[in-house]
Structures are given as C-alpha cells and as structure tokens.
Image (spheres, grey):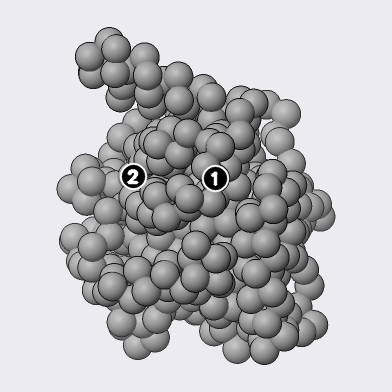
Amino acid sequence: MEPEKLIEFLRILEKLKCNTRHNWTTSGRRESVAEHSWRLVVMAFLLKDEFPELDMDRVVDMCLIHDWGEAITGDIPAFIKGGSDEETESAVLRTMTGSLPDELACRLNGLFDEMEALQTKEARLTKALDKIETLIQHNEAGADTWLPLEYELNLTYGDDISNMSEYTRRLRDLVRQESERIISEKPLGNKECGSTGSHSALDDETFEKIKALRRELHKIPELSGQERRTMEMLKTFLREHTSLSVTDRGSWFYALHQENGAEETVVFRADMDAIKGAGNIPYHGCGHDGHSAILAGLCLLTEGRVFQKNLCFLFQPAEETGEGGNPCSRLLEELGADRVYGYHNLPGYPLGTAVMRRETFSCDTVNTPEIIDKSRMLFEQEGIPCLEAAAPFRWSEDFGWYLKKCRGMYFGIGAGEDCPDLHTPDYEFPDEVIRNAVRCLYLLAEI
C-alpha cells in the first residue's frame, strides 16, 4: 500500500468517529489511548506486504499493547514525557499482565521489552508507526489546536526512527509536507515559539477584567466563615461571563465545566477569606482576593474550549482558620476527581515564578512527585520560570486535606522579591501575578 493511500485510509477511519480526539497536543482535541492504538494496529495490518522480511504479526501485537500502561496512568504529551513516566507505564503493564496465565504474560512482557529496547526491526517499525500516527492525527486536528512549540515539533518529531526504512521515510516526508502546508496557511506569526499563544496567555481585555474583579474583592474583605458578599460577587461574575454551572453549597461553592464522554475530572481550588488587621478590621493581607480572581480568570479562558475532561473550580472559605479544607475536600470524592491543584502567592520570590516542591510543600501538604515533575517540565517548556523551594514552608495550609484524597499539587507563584510579606499592613496582592498564575492553571487544565 502506497504511503499516500495509507494516509487517505486513516482519514476515512477518522470520519467514522463522531468525536475525534487528538493524542499528542495539550490543546484542542485529544485522541484517546485506545483510538491511537487502534489506528496503529490498522496501519501495521495494512503494511504486511510492505515488510515481507519482518514478523508483522509481532508488529501488530506490539502496536496493540504499546500504550496499555498509559491507558491506566493517563496520556502524557510527548514533549513532557520523561524516563520516570516510561518506568511507571512499564510497571503498570506488568501489573496488568500479572493477572494473565504465565505463558501469555511472559509473551506480552517480552514483546514490550523488545519494543522498548528497539533492537529489532519489528520494534523499530512499531516505534516509527507510533510517532507517525501521532503526527497524522495532529495534522488532522489542525493548527487551531497547536501550541506554538508544536509548529517546529511537528516538522521534526520522529525523524530519526522514521529513517529505519525507505517506506517509513517516505511516509514521514508526506506527513511533513502536510504539516508545512498547514503552517503556511496558518503561520505562527509573531507569537514567541514556546509560548502558549492565545490558549493560555491573557489578552489585555481579559487581564483588565480579572484585575478589576480582584480589586472589587479587595474592597469587601470578610473573615473566615463569613464570606457571603465575596461569594455573591464571584458567582455573579461567573454567571455574567461564562456558561459554567454554579453550585452553591452554603458556605462555599463551585463551578463546573462538563464535557460529554469525559473520563477524567480535574479540580482547581482557591481560598476566599480575609484576615484581621489593625483594630480587628478585616483586610486581604494574605492575597486570597487575588487567588479567587485568578481562579475566576481561569474560568473565563475555559469558555468554549474543549479539554476532553471535566474541570471543577472550587471556591473555598475559612482557609485561615483551617476549617474550610476538610468539608470542601469531600467534593473530590463526590466527583471522583483524578487530580487537584492549588496555589498561593509568595512574596520574596521573583514575580511570576512557579515555586515548587516534589513532596512536602508546607505543613501537612504533600504533593505527588510525578505531577510536580510533569508540571515543571511543561511550565519551563512554555517559558514560565520555575524554582525548587529549598525546604518545606513552615506555615500550615489546609490544602493538605485535598491531597489526602487525590493526586495533585500545591505550588507557589512569586509575588515579587520586594513585595511586602503576607499578613503585614503594607501587603496587597500584586496584580501582575495574575498573568503567569492563570497561564499555569490553564496549562494544568490541558494536560
């Protein structure tokens, strides 16, 4: 089968599906692991006559099992996958095959090891088809779903392994030509390569809208458990500017972005309460007005977008007293949440820098190490500066309740090295933090 005919046939298969999803990019459409493996198996089956010297039945089997581990751990974009992810996927596959008869388990594990070692022609063909199928699907999704960094990546991804045969080289060249055509019709323009462009970067109008909300929240500081006006302002903002469903739970609320058929739910949490200042007068001396405005800003960016997952935006009361996290964290169990994220602005750190720790971030707040690693790689890839905190922060944070029930991450966003300390009279949330904070959260929503 000529390469052109193979690509044409894959496009016909794509038209048979009513819900196309794209495998590689963190933006736009996302192909499921099962769909990717199915297309790979079809490719290997159709190419049996092109590789008479190979054991193509073994290639078909490798295509079938190559992503079994990722079907459990979740799809990871190619540009942030690391060695630890591959080790986890291998371990998951062996757990799965452990339930099978010994002879069958041994054969499947051997196929996976052969594929990973890339020492046989069958293994190299499987890997080449794997990468080329991803590129074909990426082209079919269209440039509207591409991150700027993917413009270059789509021209170079899989080049080395595709040189394993004349056929795969020709197939890769055809896919590259299609990518070049798409790029010529929708060039990157003056977006900086490696940035997220329109997907996560804030335009001036949206930034001003979030900043105005933050300043209005700043005017109505309310102590823990008393956040009535704050809640009403936030709910009104979401109802006026988004189509999200908003659910009031009495002392707190959440908004929900739901997608038909989504198998994953990701939760983002922000706190709303203020603290006592001079004369016991409430004021936003910890920046929770900024946290809430940023989460509302994330809601704005999700409007009309497809993530192939459900997103929950939880606005929590009473963080300062430690009484809000426990009851609100029960929502994770209700929703069957897969991951949860929270954040805090951090004076003393460079403005907009993501401050992370692989395990214990602060008292009783313990991150999932692999999520930290993936997030940091993605942030840095997107031009967001990151640094590792030297030691756990000594202050407490009731986000730990969430991380006891779900995998996730709590991290900081630098508020500026000259920013007054939290809980001091001169502190006020710096509005420029909004830009990178919203970008970070949006990127986490995409992966």
Single out the mark in the foreground, 2 or 1: 1
Q: Which mark is residue 339?
A: none
Q: Residue 198 appears at what percent x and percent y?
A: 61, 78
**What is the residue that sits farthest to the top in this orientation?**
102
- Name the amino acid, label 1: Phe
Above or below: residue 5 compared with residue 58: below
Closest to the observer: 88 or 184? 184
Q: Give the number of marks.
A: 2
Q: CA distance from mark 2 to mark 1?
A: 42 Å
- Crowding at mark 1 (Cα within 10 Å: few <14, some 14-19, many 20+): some
Residue for point 36% across, 63% down? 308
Badge 2: few (under 14), some or many (20 or more) residues near its Cα, within 10 Å? some
Q: Amino acid at mark 2?
A: Asp
Does the image show residue 271?
no
Of marks 2 and 1, which one's residue comes earlier in the chain?
A: 1
**Residue 315 in the image: x percent, y percent?**
36, 60
Q: Is residue 148 left or right of residue 241?
A: right
Residue at position x 79%, y 82% from top? 190
Residue 51: numbered disc: 1
Compare residues 178 and 45 and report the one nearer the observer: 45
* In-image side of 212 versus 244 (left or right): right
Which residue is depicted at the point 24% across and 58% down? 251
The residue under label 2 is 338
In the image shown, does 245 or 225 lie closer to the viewer?
A: 245
Secondary structure of the residue carrying numbered label 2: loop
Q: From the top left corner, tell me how far across and down residue 393 is, in percent.
A: 61, 32
